[in-house]
Image (cartoon, rainbow, N blue to C red):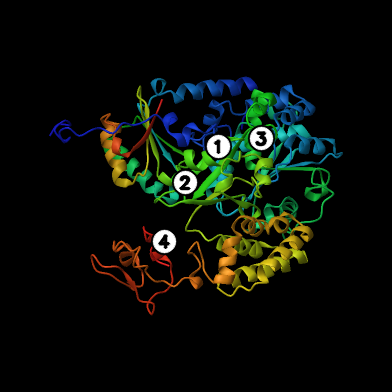
Amino acid sequence: MRKLTPNELKKIKEKAVKESDLNESAYTAKVTVHLGTCGIAAGGEEVLRALNEEIEKSKRDNIKVVISACMGMCSSEPNVTVKRMGEDSILYHNIDEEKMRQIFQGHILNGEIQSDYALAKIR
Amino acid sequence: MTENESKPEGKEKKVIPYLDEIPFFSHQRLIVLRNKGIDPEDIDEYIAKDGYQAAAKAILEMTPEQIIYEIKTSGLRGRGGAGFPTGQKWEFANRSEGEIKYVLCNADEGDPGAFMDRSVLEADPHSVLEGMIIAAKAIDAHQGYIYCRAEYPLAIKRLNIAISQAREYGLLGKDIFGSGFDFDLEIYQGAGAFVCGEETALMRSIEGMRGMPRPRPPFPAQQGLWKKPTVLNNVETYANVAQIILNGGEWYASIGTETSKGTKVFALVGTVKNIGLVEVPMGTTLRTLIFDIGGGIPKRKKFKAVQLGGPSGGCVPEAFLDTPIDYESIAKVGAIMGSGGVIVMDNQTCMVDMARFFMDFIQDESCGKCTPCREGTKRMLEILEKITNGEGESSDIELLEELSEMVQDGALCGLGQTGPNPVLSTLRYFRDEYDAHVYEKKCPGKRCPALLKFEVDLDSCTKCGICFKRCPADAIEWKKKEPAYIDKSKCIKCMTCISSCPSDAIF
């Protein structure tokens, strides 16, 4: 157990900000699965499982998976955000297992945005 | 096969808009929901977004009076529904004498259809912890409780992780930041009672007793949990605090209207295209919320009314859609801002049935302590059920109004005092529907099975066959190019055909 000083707090912030920039981290892609209760109720856990299976099969160890919570558009859950290093993030919506695998192969591995399932780009 | 060969020739690639070009997102202003998208189970991600900087500032650089000054300047009002000025509440508690004081968070969120607090707790639990730490410094409290409903297991899980990570870093516990200031908190789980969202009932529940309210004064800021001075605020209220301390009360007060500052999180649900969680500046109109952000009414149906404030609130019809969302303006049209539940209703809604639904909820949740609520809501529910069953009498509506007044005046707590609101509000704007139920035995919204014939109007039927395909009882006969026919001996009155008919042809 530590007792942070304000300076240490700032250092943690600097380190965390740096690591969240893909260019500075060991990861080349980050996939955020939005798992609030709404996402889970819509089938988000199956989507997450499919994603983890695809990553395992691909033997890539530089893809970061983040589990976050509701991003607001509950009616289009499950929602998944994909960011590849140097590119805009893409917010996908109404995702199921099959679409997740397709997005993994097409977008995450090969950089081809699956625009049929995309809701928005994020700068 | 290469990537190029797999694409059909000449297929137009869909243009993907930027997030800030989509009305659902572009109309929002995120303060409470600013951190959606981070990993809520990693405190470092919260710290990356300036997390706990405000707590450090409050504990090390500000006096309690300075903290209270900023909160008062901000104009922040309680987001749980009552809208009491937060700074003033903290000031009362600060001025109360005593070594032992408490900071409580109301995470009971009982309104049907509301999930603002759940989303904040699941997405950004640290923002609530930080708000409570700052409140504790403001009133000199050293112990806190988060009263969270047990029906939110994910929120409780993430809160527990957040609390233990904050303790690991010394942000909760003894001598925070080496300042000599102690503060720690625990979660207390609710046990399924709506009334425990009422502040005095909540405190009794934490004390180990049956959740029942008591008269006030004395107010919790003077005598609350275990009779000690207590600040109780809603999840969303606390989630605003850190930003106010970092950016200043004046910054917060620059957003919103004269009387209602800042932003409000709404759970936009019902018959609206974009169902979800939105945060908008106070003063945004209902029309913008429902049509620009919400995308309007789906399936080519028409807007009828929007229910604000859950079982304590009221409905607002089309004529008042340009009302700006702030505490006073909404109250003027007979509803309340409430905790943020916004239920949009289309023309296939029965307003009498809607009032019955909320009264059923209130009656079920009434703790039973005071006679006006316990007996009054029971009788009101009986009358509403009579009316929706086609047995309404001419004296019923007058009796409903009389009972409403009695329950509002005589009930001990907010549950009873606001319970009649949906009835009064629907009577104010949709009295013709009540009259139709009582005098004509008709349900204009087509939702009350006892008042429907379950027949197909041959003039309106487009012979699409959708009702035939969806009927779970095989009670509909239909052949292509012929109108549908409902066999009443098989019909179970489940309403599926009426809801599915795209031409509104079943009555």
Name the mark on residue B499.
4
Output the chain of dot 4: B
- Do discs 3 and 4 belong to a common subunit? yes
- Do discs 2 and 1 belong to a common subunit? yes
Q: Which residue is mark 1?
A: B279
Residues at marks 1 and 3 touching, judged by CB atoms closer than 8 Å: no
Residue under the image location 50 percent in, 73 percent down? B450
Residues at marks 3 and 2 touching, judged by CB atoms closer than 8 Å: no
Q: Amino acid at mark 1?
A: Glu
Name the mark on residue B131.
3
For the residues labelled 3 and 4, the Cα–Cα distance comes to 45 Å
For the residues labelled 1 and 4, the Cα–Cα distance comes to 31 Å
Quadrant (top left, top right, bottom left, bottom right) of the N terminus of chain A:
top right
Task: Pinpoint residue B372: horizontal percent, then vertical percent.
Answer: 76, 65
Output the chain of dot 1: B
The residue positioned farthest toward the right in the image shown: B97
Residues at marks 4 and 2 touching, judged by CB atoms closer than 8 Å: no
Q: Please tell me which of labels 1 and 4 falls first in the chain.
A: 1
User: Counting other residues with Cα less than 10 Å from the Cα at mark 2, is it few (<14), some (14-19), or many (20 or more)?
Assistant: many
Task: Provide the secondary structure element on which disc 4 rests.
Answer: helix
Q: Which callout, 3 or 2, points to the residue nearer the camera?
A: 2
Output the chain of dot 2: B
Decide if residue B399 is in sight here.
yes
Name the mark on residue B275.
2
Task: Pinpoint residue B426: horizontal percent, then vertical percent.
Answer: 61, 57
Task: Name the one closer to the observer, B380 or B126.
Answer: B380
Output the chain of dot 3: B
